[in-house]
Image (cartoon, helix red, strand yellow):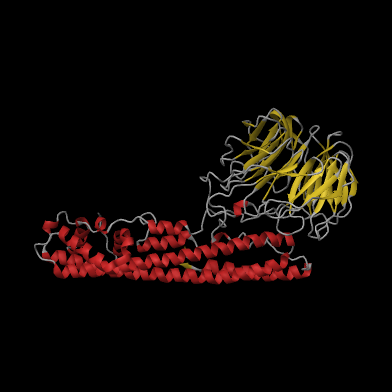
């Protein structure tokens, strides 16, 4: 660390301040020659006394640091217990009753954790986060704005911007989402050029070209697997090895022909992934086994010319439902789930036209899931959900271009859903939401060059803003990094092979960074995400871990336990990092104590040796020599001598202006 030399601190002006204080003035003396022998000596003695006050403050700060570290060590032990309980809940052989018991133990430990965090304070200053600690340091005179060593210390202390979600969120009626890579960064990487970029594609060849693709952890080994659907009806499972490679695919017959879409979810509440596939004429449900295999498909007739497949809980009964589009009769079909792998009577609603795609999200802020349909024309339909499985009559929104699909998400960080729409003319278009199911008239278009077919939104570069990834009809997957205000950078194109189709995001390499998986005519292509400079530590401060221990987080199911286990391991890593930062802080403060002690003795010795002929600049040189002789390695903290002196004056109810 480059620090200020002692000579730049102990100047004639610096000595004059103490002279002024000895004369009862709150301003420095204008000229050293006006100082008498007595006033100069008294000023130096006052300086020595102030340095004694500073040492008291620094010793108090060390006590606070030790308290912080001791608390972190207690929290570390609690976290280890939480990890142990959660790991037991992830095991296949753990029964539902046992998981419920483990969940009660988890909640008790979580309550202890939150109590300790909230009570570790000095006044209003929390000793476990950067803001509280930095205030204490500033009171003593160690300010990160003036001290490089303190700035370096807090740069390594993990307390970044609060996010109401920790590392995973849940969708109503669905499984917990895959832990995103945004859970594994130590700070915003918006200036990190590597984040949001991808390596060249690697191709996994399958027996036939898939019509659709999705990703999930099918066998609950904590590694991403790939699920592909062939037009002839075969569903292939490619189990991931966790390093970007996959085992030979295993095929299951869906019983469908002209199969179009496939999704994974738990339809019978046995905590095991099931499969649902869609063709032009019906659905096929394949219930999963605990070993990652699947039972024979059950056909569910639904009509003709089906399109669009969305899984959600439309009636808020905590049971997964299915929404499809009937393009022949311009209908929206809603299959209400029974949570046992069967469905109630189908509810139908009149569509605004023959639609091809459907997106689901609360678009009007009433807490109910709404639907947005796209028709391959210049119109979009909006259907406000009532929360009971029914929807209001559709409203039509005119759009520019020919829209085949749309993805909902908050792309401008205003807490209101927007849309990214795919245009067959070779564009991706952004429409800002008004929060009532309508959209602003302005449209921002981004060129893809080829015809985009599917898209997905996620934060791939960990800057806190949604990005958009689209596959297209030629050889490319397009990545548009969001700026957080509804605008996007120019699309970056990645060659993934012939005829890209659906696209999905997951971490296939196990490095905590999102990768892109795209279905192609050969099988599927993987674009491995490049870790940014800050890609690993969990980016949340201890005060923000209420979301990890909130009432809606539980380990009563294996998927939930896996999600929370990832968060807990990140939490433990953060605690270890912050403990190391506090160890470094103890060293820094200790060095400043040595420096201030040496300065105090130097001022006393100078006070005893000054004569009427001495000028302040000569005394300053004497002080420099004596401090250098007595401070040793602590001279690396010389830049802190003056701000600590100012703080000591404040603590002594004295003040001066420079």
Residue 24 x/y as whole percent: 19, 63
Residue 595 in view here: no
Q: Nearer the viewer, residue 225 or 280?
A: 225
Q: How many marks?
A: 0
Give the quarter of the image for residue 496: top right
Q: Is residue 60 above or below residue 550?
A: below
Q: Is residue 103 above or below residue 478?
A: below
Q: Quadrant of the C terminus?
A: bottom left
Residue 100 x/y as whole percent: 74, 68
Left or right of 310: which side holds 77? Answer: left
Q: Is residue 137 above or below residue 179?
A: below
Q: Nearer the viewer, residue 70 or 342?
A: 70
Left or right of 51: which side holds 432? Answer: right
Residue 403 x/y as whole percent: 72, 31
Q: Is residue 97 above or below residue 297?
A: below
- Residue situated furthest left in the rendering: 613
Seen at 61% across and 69% down, the residue is 80
Q: Quadrant of the N terminus?
A: bottom left
Seen at 65% across and 35% down, the residue is 439
Seen at 10% across and 66% down, the residue is 611
Residue 275 in view here: yes
Residue 572 x/y as whole percent: 58, 64
Left or right of 91: which side holds 23? Answer: left
């Amino acid at each position: 660390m480059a620090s200020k030399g002692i000579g730049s601190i102990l100047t004639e002006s610096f000595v004059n301040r103490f002279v002024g204080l000895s004369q009862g003035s709150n301003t420095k003396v204008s000229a050293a020659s006006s100082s008498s022998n007595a006033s100069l000596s008294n000023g130096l003695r006052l300086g020595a006394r102030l340095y004694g006050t500073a040492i008291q403050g620094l010793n108090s700060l060390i006590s606070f640091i030790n308290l912080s570290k001791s608390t972190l060590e207690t929290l570390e032990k609690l976290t280890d217990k939480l990890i142990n309980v959660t790991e037991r809940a992830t095991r296949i052989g753990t029964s539902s009753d046992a998981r419920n018991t483990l969940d009660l133990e988890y909640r008790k430990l979580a309550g202890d954790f939150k109590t300790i965090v909230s009570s570790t304070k000095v006044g209003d200053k929390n000793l476990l986060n950067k803001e509280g600690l930095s205030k204490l340091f500033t009171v003593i005179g160690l300010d990160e704005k003036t001290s490089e060593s303190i700035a370096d210390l807090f740069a390594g202390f993990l307390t970044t911007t609060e996010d109401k979600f920790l590392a995973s969120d849940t969708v109503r009626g669905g499984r917990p989402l895959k832990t995103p890579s945004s859970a594994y960064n130590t700070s915003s990487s918006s200036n990190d050029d590597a984040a949001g970029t991808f390596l060249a594609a690697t191709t996994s060849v399958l027996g036939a070209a898939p019509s659709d693709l999705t990703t999930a952890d099918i066998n609950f080994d904590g590694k991403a697997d790939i699920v592909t659907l062939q037009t002839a009806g075969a569903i292939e499972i490619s189990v991931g090895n966790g390093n970007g490679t996959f085992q030979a695919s295993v095929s299951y017959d869906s019983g469908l022909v002209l199969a179009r879409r496939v999704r994974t979810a738990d339809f019978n509440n046995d905590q095991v992934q099931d499969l649902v596939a869609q063709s032009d004429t019906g659905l096929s449900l394949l219930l999963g086994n605990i070993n990652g295999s699947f039972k024979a498909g059950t056909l569910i007739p639904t009509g003709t010319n089906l399109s669009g497949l969305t899984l959600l809980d439309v009636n808020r009964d905590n049971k997964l439902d299915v929404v499809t589009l009937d393009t022949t009769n311009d209908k929206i079909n809603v299959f209400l789930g029974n949570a046992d792998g069967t469905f109630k009577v189908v509810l139908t609603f009149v569509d605004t036209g023959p639609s091809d795609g459907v997106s689901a999200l609360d678009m009007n802020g009433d807490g109910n899931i709404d639907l947005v349909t796209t028709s391959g024309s210049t119109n979009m339909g909006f259907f406000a959900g009532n929360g009971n499985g029914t929807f209001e009559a559709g409203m039509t929104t005119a759009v520019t271009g020919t829209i085949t699909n749309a993805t909902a998400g908050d792309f401008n960080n205003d807490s209101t859903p927007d849309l990214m729409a795919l245009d067959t003319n070779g564009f991706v278009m952004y429409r800002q939401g008004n929060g009532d199911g309508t959209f602003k008239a302005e449209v921002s278009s981004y060129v893809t060059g080829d015809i985009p077919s599917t898209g997905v939104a996620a934060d791939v570069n960990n800057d806190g803003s949604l990005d958009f990834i689209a596959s297209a009809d030629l050889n490319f997957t397009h990545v548009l990094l969001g700026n957080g205000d509804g605008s996007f950078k120019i699309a970056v194109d990645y060659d993934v092979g012939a005829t890209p189709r659906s696209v999905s995001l997951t971490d296939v390499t196990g490095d905590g960074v999102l990768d892109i998986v795209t279905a192609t005519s050969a099988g599927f292509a993987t674009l491995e995400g490049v870790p940014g400079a800050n890609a690993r530590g969990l980016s949340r401060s201890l005060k923000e871990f209420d979301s990890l221990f909130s009432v809606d987080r539980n380990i009563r199911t294996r998927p939930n336990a896996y999600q929370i286990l990832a968060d807990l391991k990140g939490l433990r890593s953060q605690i270890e990092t912050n403990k190391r930062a506090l160890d470094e802080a103890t060293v820094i403060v200790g060095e400043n104590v040595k420096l201030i002690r040496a300065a105090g003795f130097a001022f006393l010795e100078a006070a005893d040796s000054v004569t009427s002929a001495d000028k302040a600049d000569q005394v300053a040189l004497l002080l420099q020599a004596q401090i250098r002789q007595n401070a040793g390695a602590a001279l690396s903290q010389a830049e802190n001598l003056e701000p600590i002196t100012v703080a000591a004056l404040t603590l002594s109810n004295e003040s001066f202006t420079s």
